[in-house]
Image (cartoon, rainbow, N blue to C red):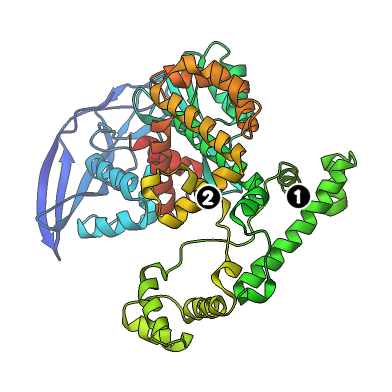
Amino acid sequence: MFDVAVMAIKDITDDDGMVRLTISPVTAMSACPGCGTRSGRIHSRYHRRLADLPTSGRLVELVLLARRFFCYAVLCRRRVFTERFDPNVLAPWARRTARLDQVVHHLGLALGGRPAAALARRLMLPVSNDTLLRVVRRRGSPRIVPPTVIGVDDWAWRRNHRYGTLICDLERRRTIALLPDREPATTQAWLEQQPQVSIVARDRASGYALAVSKALPTATQVADRWHLMENASRAFLDAVRKSMRQIRTAVGATSIDPALLTAAERLQYEGYLRREDTNNAVQRLAKEGIPIKEIVRRTGHSRGLVRKILRGQGTDIFRTRESSLELHLLWLDQQWQAGHRNGTELWRRLSKEGFQGSLRVVTEWATRRRRADQMGVEALKRTPSARIIARLMTLGRDALTKAETVLVAAIEKGVPTIVEARTIIADFQGMIRRRSLADLAPWLERASPSMVASFVNGIVRDRAAVEEAITSPWSNGQTEGQITKLKLVKRQMYGRGKLDLLQARVIGAG
């Protein structure tokens, strides 16, 4: 239907840094786009101005002497049609040649709007950021090859507020679909259109498991190994949080004297007391047999908070974190022993040594050190946070300091249930690494009555997918990598790209 685009150059001019070529087609006839009938009778001529690739650092403009033809087909509704060319050379109504449009499209795919427009200007391709995104949207996403092994995982439009679903072809290692939400019905509708899928690797979310079971009942589901390892570590952290009262008793830090606290610590301690009052009120209502929904109505707290309290997941008294003074503590101790005990003066001297922190950090340290000298170090003993304790208990002893080793030994002696939970979690993670399916059944029997029983119950409910995770070579790691790529693309567009643009950039770039 399209003629080979053979052009004759009529004129070449160089005008203010722009090369302008006047060209005209040399074919005598053209085919009607409506009926395909070829015609050689010319109705009229007109000029089409086209942008082309630059040459020698100068813009190039093509002035095409296009023609209109009469169509003599009796049944064709067109009487006059414009000349058509090969789409690989020049598309209808286009203002750019196909090869230039291809470059613009790839710039938009790689960089988005404004960054691509800035690079295009340096490449002597004058195109706006809106045009770049318009080209990407117009070309859309290419057709996918029907997959047989896929990975499914969620991604955040806005973290903790709105999520979507990414589907990855694990065999070809590319994204094939982006869904606007992570509802089971949406995923199920997409999967029902792909009956050839035989293996689905997914995360631990029950929604995806339900969608796959309904849409592809014969497909094999594979739980993601990384999520299994991460869920196991989180289960141990929850066990430590539930045992914080016993841990404080074991390390001898059960009582706190408010008079010894700094201003920041006093605020944290007062918040802890308020949380304890809330916990006691919720637990008292639960002991009376009141359901969670009624507790939420009476107390005004969220359902998630009430569930967290009833599961024993309390919070720490103090938010222990690494201080910016860690690298300078030796120097501060030396200054303190030398008699320099003014916090402001210590901060001035420390700033000259390269310290980047604020004055308050140093004055808080000086206040604590002064009170420690007056009351004794034991009076100011602090229990690390649950997260720090969980990390110390899972590190090798050769990586701990002497003080940390003593702390871990005290916890292990005073709270043996934590040691049991740590052993169970370590055995599970070792089983995943060794890919030893034979150890799963004995592990489930041994771990059921432990402090990580909720994690064990989740493994039992998803046992078939967990067994496949241990034995199957497929996993969702590739999907996680594609989500990382999607996040990069989304942030390049400041989070304002809609689903069609994200699909065009992520899927089209593959």
Amino acid carrying label 2: it is: Ile
* Any part of residue 178 in sight: no
Residue at the image point whose x is 42% and y is 88% from the top:
339
Residue at the image point whose x is 43% and y is 28% from the top:
430
In screen coordinates, is 490 left or right of 456?
A: left
| Quarter where residue 30 is shown | top left
Judge by depth and name the residue closer to the eye, 19 or 134. 134
Looking at the picture, does residue 48 appear above or below residue 458? Answer: below
For the C terminus, the quadrant is: top left
Judge by depth and name the residue closer to the eye, 134 or 485. 485
* Tag 2 residue: 389
Q: Mark 1 or mark 2: which comes first in sequence?
A: 1
The mark found on residue 111 in the picture is none
| Quarter where residue 23 is shown | top left
Amino acid carrying label 1: it is: Ser
In screen coordinates, is 296 left or right of 346?
A: right
* Tag 1 residue: 302
In screen coordinates, is 308 left or right of 1?
A: right
Classify mark 1: helix, strand or loop.
loop
CA separation in Å, label 1 and label 2: 28 Å
